[in-house]
Image (cartoon, rainbow, N blue to C red):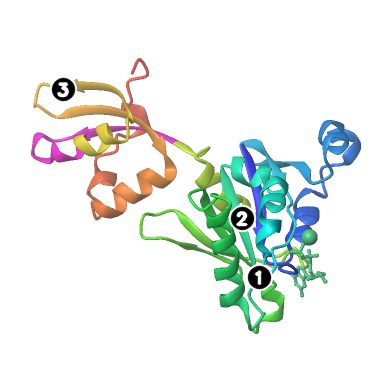
């Protein structure tokens, strides 16, 4: 998977790129080093992705430069996730953010999953790193400092969640009265195995992204979590 850094000039993309990947020694990563200096491997808790740095966006991109710009952002359009880096200490933050979004629309990269990285929190007073989650349970914004290396654990967590590498495998015992939950798992194509016990409970093995699970669990107001089998009860043949 590819994760591309986009954002307004000076937001801190290159600093973040270098800080996040500095533990990956070039020699150990020669493929990427020789191919393109703006691509490096980024290790995640479970698996690795390719991190791509890109040129900064500027206001009022001349129209005849858009084609050239599109070519430069080839990786961006192929990325699974865009990290939209913003300088949260910049008074023009909102305008710059909107400007970048409109350029992303112009290069047809606006449908790609986006995580906003609010950078330079070290310049704000009393600010702790955190992840802001959207209504659907997906990470939406992460607050970090690329230069001071604050919040990197949260950033990697958010990327991991978005990229769907966090997969939950659960077995649920759903009473007949709560059968409406089955449809939700069907819609996510998450059902691995389905059976019924003598009392008519549905024994359901599901496999889905952690983000989807958290969203469903939240919607159910805790009911789904109460249906989780204890590990000792799980039928390993499922
Ligand atoms: N205070 C502070 N400065 C930062 C941070 N991240 C980047 N910078 C500075 O912001 C400027 C622009 O950074 P750069 O990575 O080149 O931005 P880019 O244009 O988005 O690639 C540089 O002077 C960096 O040292 C940060 O977390 N805190
Ligand atoms: Mg840069």
Q: CA distance from mark 3 to mark 1?
A: 62 Å
Where's residue 93, x and y in %?
61, 76
Q: Is mark 3 within 8 Å of ligand 1?
A: no
Q: Nearer the viewer, residue 107 or 173?
A: 107
Which mark is nearer the camera, 2 or 1? 1
State yes or no: residue 52 in magenta: no
Where's residue 178, x and y in %?
13, 40
Identify the disc placed on residue 34.
none
Label 1, secondary structure: give it.
loop
Which mark is nearer the camera, 3 or 1? 1
Q: How many marks?
A: 3
**In the image: residue 43, left or right of residue 194:** right
Q: Is mark 2 within 8 Å of ligand 1?
A: no
The residue at which mark 1 appears reads as 60
Identify the disc placed on residue 196.
3
**In the image: residue 134, left or right of residue 121:** left
Identify the disc placed on residue 83.
2
- Identify the residue at horizontal 36%, vertical 44% (top origin): 213
Where's residue 229, x and y in %?
29, 34
**In the image: residue 132, left or right of residue 33:** left
State yes or no: residue 175 in magenta: yes
Label 3, secondary structure: give it.
strand
- Could you tell me if the residues under marks 3 and 1 are in contact, i.e. CB atoms within 8 Å? no
* Of callouts 3 and 1, the N-terminal one: 1
Q: Nearer the viewer, residue 196 or 26?
A: 26
Q: Nearer the viewer, residue 30 or 205?
A: 30
Question: What's the magenta region?
Answer: 168-182
* Of callouts 2 and 1, the N-terminal one: 1
Where's residue 4, x and y in %?
66, 49
> Does the rendering let one see residue 77?
yes
């Amino acid at each position: 998977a590819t994760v591309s850094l986009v954002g307004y000039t000076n937001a801190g993309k290159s600093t973040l790129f270098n800080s996040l990947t500095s533990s990956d020694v070039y020699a150990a990563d020669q493929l990427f080093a020789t191919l393109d200096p703006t691509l490096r491997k980024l290790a995640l808790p479970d698996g690795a992705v390719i991190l791509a740095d890109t040129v900064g966006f500027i206001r009022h991109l001349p129209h005849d430069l858009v084609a050239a710009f599109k070519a430069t952002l080839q990786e961006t359009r192929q990325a699974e996730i865009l990290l939209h880096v913003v300088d949260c200490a910049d008074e023009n933050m909102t305008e710059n953010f909107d400007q970048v979004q409109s350029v992303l629309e112009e290069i047809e990269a606006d449908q790609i999953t986006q995580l906003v990285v609010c950078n330079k929190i070290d310049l704000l007073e009393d600010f702790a790193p955190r992840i802001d989650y959207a209504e659907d349970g997906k990470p939406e914004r992460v607050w970090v400092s690329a230069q001071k290396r604050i919040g990197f654990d949260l950033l990697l967590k958010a990327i991991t969640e978005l990229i769907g590498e966090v997969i939950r495998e659960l077995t649920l015992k759903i009473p007949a009265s709560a059968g409406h939950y089955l449809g939700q798992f069907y819609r996510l194509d998450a059902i691995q195995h389905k059976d019924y016990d003598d009392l008519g409970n549905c024994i359901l093995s599901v496999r889905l992204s952690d983000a989807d699970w958290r969203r469903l669990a939240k919607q159910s107001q805790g009911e789904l979590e109460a249906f989780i089998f204890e590990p000792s009860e799980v039928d390993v043949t499922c």
